[in-house]
Image: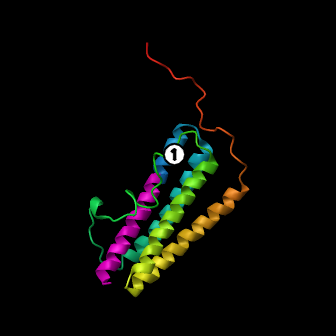
Amino acid sequence: MSKQHLGEFLAHSVELESEARERYIELSEAMAEHKNEPVAAFFARMADESRLHLDEVAEIAAQYELPDLKAWEYVWPEEESPEALSYEAAHYRMTLRQAMLLALDNERAAERFYRSFAESSEDEETRRLASQFAAEEASHAAHLVKLLGKLPADPAHPLEEDDAPHMPE
């Protein structure tokens, strides 16, 4: 692969980490609005960790010329970047365990994304950086697994509504 492909990889990496950070901030704010403080605090911590990884990736990317990709030019395995937590999967009454499981899925998806670059690129620098990023995501996932092991089990039906539905008359 050419240096242009390295630039494309880094552009994707910057966008992936940026979108992850933005999504965690949004979800943290939403959970705080709904007084779900443990989950809001967790998502805020994940946003901070995403910022640190974004800073690291951006520092590396600053050494190269990156293409100016439009939103539709990013090639993701799914519709959104691998580490952008799904809005549909979040619920204002979700438990800390549920939030951590969603984050764990995202860390593993990001690891797979980076690993695919590491395994498919012909460019040595792209392979090296992609492997490094994949290892960091795997480390984040392992940390979440360790934290999940310390949490108590969730209640049987944590997302059930307390109020009966209100029907307009």
Q: Quadrant of the N terminus?
A: bottom left
> Observer-nearest residue: 114 or 42?
114
Provide residue 78's location: percent of width, then percent of height.
40, 59
Residue located 51% across and 73% down the image: 134
Residue 3 vs 150, above or below: the answer is below
User: What main secondary structure does the magenta stretch of the protein show?
Assistant: helix
Q: Quadrant of the C terminus?
A: top left
Residue 11 inside the magenta-drawn segment = yes
Question: What amino acid type should be assigned to the residue bearing mark 1?
Answer: Ala
Q: Residue at x 54, y 75 (%)?
A: 135
Residue 20's place in the image compared with 26, above or below, is below
Left or right of 71, for residue 102: right
- Residue sitting at the far top: 169
Q: Position of residue 157 (x, y in %)?
A: 64, 38
What residue range appears in magenta?
1-23
- Judge left or right: residue 49 versus residue 96: left
Q: Which residue is mark 1?
A: 90
User: Which residue is at 27% across, 66% downward?
Assistant: 69
Q: Is residue 44 magenta?
A: no
Q: Is residue 101 above or below residue 77?
A: above
The quarter holding residue 55 reads bottom left
**Visual colour scheme:** rainbow
Q: Position of residue 88 (x, y in %)?
A: 46, 45
Mark 1 burial class by Cα count in 10 Å: few <14, some 14-19, many 20+: some
Q: Is residue 105 above or below residue 59?
A: above
Residue 77 in which image quadrant: bottom left
In percent of width and height, residue 71 lies at 29, 59
Residue at 52% from the left image edge and 38% from the top image edge: 33
